[in-house]
Image (cartoon, rainbow, N blue to C red):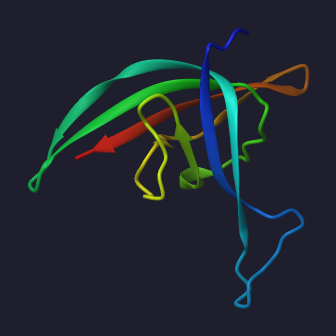
Amino acid sequence: MILHDRVTVVMSVPFDPPQYDDLGNDVYQTITETVPAEVFPLGTDGVVTATRDKVVSRYRMVLAPTVDIPPRIGDKLRLEWDVFTLTADTTSGLFVDGGVERHMMHGRVHHYELITKQVVG
């Protein structure tokens, strides 16, 4: 599979072996890695709310398995691609819309597929 794009994957995952803070909560580490990818636009929707208008952009991404994305990572995964850059602001970049699909071939992860979204407004 030829992947023409580059996507930066940023995720917060628990340490392995687990580490805990003083209250017994998991301590997370941040993993940042740029991976080969293919990005397909799915469209943009305009959503009108009572307070203001919002624009939701969606993309389908195919990511190379150069980083291990844990199942059910949810909102602890953000992606940076093209104009969707990551900043210290927790609303920047692209977010996963749904789950991350692991596509297996011969017992190994061949690639990941996911739908991303960015809400502006």
Q: Is residue 42 left or right of residue 78?
A: left
Q: How many marks?
A: 0
Residue at the spot 47% in from the left edge and 35% down from the top edge: 116
Q: Quadrant of residue 100?
A: top right
Between residue 82 and residue 64, name the one nearer to us.
82
Q: Is residue 42 left or right of residue 15?
A: left
| In the rendered image, the vertical position of residue 86 relative to residue 8, given as above or below | below
Q: Quadrant of the N terminus?
A: top right
Q: Position of residue 36 (x, y in %)?
A: 68, 23
Q: Position of residue 118 (x, y in %)?
A: 38, 40
Residue at the spot 43% in from the left edge and 58% down from the top edge: 89
| In the rendered image, the vertical position of residue 11 relative to residue 25, given as above or below | above
Q: Is residue 55 left or right of residue 92?
A: left
Between residue 34 and residue 57, name the one nearer to us.
34
Between residue 29 and residue 108, name the one nearer to us.
29
Outermost residue toward the bottom in this view: 22
